Amino acid sequence: MSGTTLDDYTDRYAARIHGMAQSEIRALFAVASRPEVVSLAGGNPDTTALPMAELGDMFAQLLRDNGPAAMLYCPGQGDTRLREEICRVMASTGIAAASPDDVVVTVGAQQGLSLLATVFLDPGDIVLAEGPTYVGALGVFQAAQARVRHVTMDAEGLIPEALEAAIAESDTPPKFLYTVPTYQNPTGVTLTDRRRAAVLDICDRHGLLIVEDDPYGMLAFDGEPPAPLRARTDDGVFYLGTFSKTFAAGLRVGWVLAPPAVRDKLVLASESQILCPSAFTQAAVTRYLSTMPWRQQVKVFRTLYQERRDTMLACLAESMPAGMTWTRPGGGLFVWADLPHGIDSKAMLPQALAERVAYVPGTGFHADGGGTGQMRLNFSFPTSERIREGVRRLAGVIDAATRLRDTFTA
């Protein structure tokens, strides 16, 4: 320790996070939250659709019945009763063989991903991920100093041949494939059944682990969602779940489903980070799942978000200039749009904010600088009326950028 200064520690930390890109979403948040701005940028559920009076009664009853215990520490793996309820929730999606012993409760799925990175990743390791992919995952991998290699997607999700090529072209064996196969963030695209089987086969043949992130799977609009990858095999697939999209993001309750050998390491890593997840929020989610009609509430969210998706798609079709395309998600929270050729979504953002509309530029979802001509649009949080106004403002911004492009091209 002799001779080591505070500057030495600062330099080491700075070197560790060197190159970490600031989240586009975080940079936008302060401006996009202003009431005069129509924000199509977030990823919030609409908690106004929750039965607040009934929830108030539920919380009050929880405090009367269990208040002292809910205010204490709890086991690092999470409350046993909640883990049992989580297994029932997973069973409703097709994951029927899960045991409460293999569930680790986390502070949202984000912490679960961070724990998996802590256990598996060393500096310089390769992680495969869809291109584009969830911006929060990129932050976790960058913090671990891992290298992200994107795997190309299309309208049917991750392309198996591209996955095979990415594995073959990696200079070291990738540690795992990170994927959001159902109503993906940011594209809204869903991996088809045929490709799910192909991806599982490829990863099995190459001994490649899969981290399946499934925050949106229950929010299906067009029929029932496909079964998760973890429902198809319990070998080599780590499953991340959360109640942030189907109940309340503010409670910050998620989980990891992992085999025993890895589960114990995840618990140790979690204890070193937070000691234990909140006993109160776990008790609240447990009571919600065991006493409230949560399945009906998921249907309420589905209906509400489907209406808003349809509003957004109709407004895009009516307002946007030629040369712009977008996805039609079968569930989830997001539409992914490709701008007319030559339009940079990040460069256009200041003008959009000046016109009081916000979106997330596509560059935030790529580790390699891609996505300049793309943007993510959220339809779950703004009302249909706000969506109409937001798309109208955005169409004017894109039209102005297109005319400016044409002027300089001419």
Image: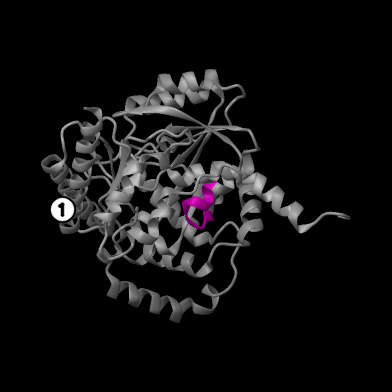
The N terminus is located in which quarter? bottom right
User: SS class of the residue under badge 1?
Assistant: helix
Taking the spot 53% from the left edge, 68% from the top edge, the residue there is: 279
Magenta highlight range: 105-113
- Residue 243 is one of the magenta-drawn residues: no
Residue 6: quadrant of the picture: bottom right
| Residue at figure coordinates x 37%, y 65% from the top left | 288
Q: Which residue, given by chain and number where applicable, does mark 1 sit on? A: 388
Residue 62 vs residue 16, the one in the foreground = 16
Q: Residue furthest left?
A: 318
Task: List x then y, in percent, for residue 361.
Answer: 35, 43
User: Which residue is rendered at x = 26% and y = 30% of the image?
Assistant: 341
Q: Amino acid at mark 1?
A: Arg
Q: Position of 384 compared to 74: left or right?
A: left
Label 1: how many Cα within 10 Å (few below 14, some 14–19, many 20+): many
Residue 72 placed where, x, y %? 58, 73
* x, y percent for residue 67: 49, 78
- Residue shown at the point (40%, 35%) measured from the top left: 132
Name the side, left or right, on which 135 lies relative to 37. Answer: right
Q: Is residue 217 visible?
A: no
Q: Quadrant of the C terminus?
A: top left
The answer to whether 168 is drawn above or below residue 176 in the figure is above
Residue 130 position within the rendered picture, expressed as x and y whole percent measured from the top left:
42, 33
Along the viewing direction, whichever of 84 and 329 lies nearer the viewer: 329
Q: Is residue 13 at least partly visible in the picture?
A: yes
Q: Is residue 108 magenta?
A: yes
